[in-house]
Image (cartoon, rainbow, N blue to C red):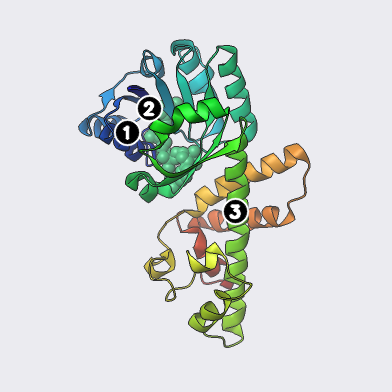
Amino acid sequence: MKTLGFIGLGNMGLPMAKNLLGADFMVKGFDLSSDALNAFKEAGGTVCSSVGETASNVDCVITMLPSGPIVQDTYLGDDGILANCGSDCLLIDSSTIDVATARAVSAAAADKGCAMLDAPVSGGVSGAAAGTLAFMVGGSKDAFDRAQPVLDPMGAKIVHAGDSGNGQAAKACNNMLLAISMIGTCEAFNLGRSLGLDDQVFFDIASNASGQSWSLTSYCPVPGPLPTSPANNGYQPGFATALMLKDLGLAMEAAQSTGVQTPLGELSKKIYSAMTDAGHGGVDFSGVIKHLDGSL
Ligand code: NAD
């Protein structure tokens, strides 16, 4: 694979595309924003004037777009990706979207003979810049193997999660668990403080006991114990509350579609929704500790 098309050159897509350029791919790109296109051109990318032009005569198309409806339009529209790409072109959607749309678009691609992967990421803008994203990938094993040279320059951990849609399923389940565990960790600190327990003392105990979790030991929501966590930086993101709320919405949509019970996922969504409604969607999601104690 030599020539790639990249659609959606925003906060995540631009640094991802830069890493592909750095790995000696020829990258054609398109975005609705002229600022994004200028930055892409400055990095050595070849600017296109439409989705269709980006998808023509390339070995692989990667999309990094805001939502399911936009992904659907971009692939299935009249001048969309499927109308313009060759049948041997590999399609990779790295946007975070709902499982149902991921599966529907992949089925439409298969009708044209194209292999498609849903490959959402975690790791945020810093992981995108460093080329250390974690990719959760749904689709055939054959397409997954073909995608390795393209995903490698952008990611540190690339996991095949199963058939089409399973990458999005893994991302929704992981982030629902993260939201629940972060809120639980915040509640424990707030309760400890109210009982006179020092933050660092509680951290030292819980991080070596059964309360241990990633939210506690890798992203501690109070300042002090972990100097790199956003709590030490006024809860600047990191991972903004608005993005966590988007992911919880996708998880709850998926839960509704299968009828499974996710009461804590629902409650987490209500809490992050209240925080966003109060104007704090730009605060890191660990700042929920301040929302819960009433100081935000
Ligand atoms: P962003 O808003 O910065 O970038 C999206 C880009 O898509 C924008 O530049 C926009 O102009 C472009 N765009 C929108 N509609 C388009 C269209 N029809 N054709 C071409 N370009 C179009 O968003 P982002 O932060 O880069 O996020 C992209 C995706 O990655 C989202 O699905 C998000 O949920 C997911 N994600 C984001 C993060 C993060 O930390 N920002 C982390 C993991 C996953």
Q: Is residue 295 above or below residue 37?
A: below
Q: Is residue 68 above or below residue 47?
A: below
What residue is at 59 percent from the left and 29 percent from the top?
102
**Measured Cα–Cα span from mark 3 to mark 1:** 36 Å
Q: Nearer the viewer, mark 3 or mark 2?
A: 2
Q: Which residue is mark 1?
A: 20
The amino acid beneath tag 3 is: Ser
On the question of residue 69 being in view, the answer is no
Q: Which quarter of the frame holds ligand 1?
A: top left
Asked whether mark 2 and ligand 1 are closer than 8 Å, the reply comes as no
Q: Which residue is mark 2?
A: 6
On the question of residue 25 being in view, the answer is yes
Q: Are marks 2 and 1 in contact (CB under 8 Å)?
A: yes
Return the disc, 2 or 1, that comes first in the chain's sequence: 2
Identify the element where label 3 is drawn: helix
Which residue is situated farthest in the bottom direction here? 196
The amino acid beneath tag 2 is: Phe
Q: Are marks 3 and 1 in contact (CB under 8 Å)?
A: no
- In the visual, does 29 lie left or right of 71? left
Identify the element where label 1 is drawn: helix
Q: Which residue is mark 3?
A: 273
Q: Is residue 9 above or below residue 209?
A: above
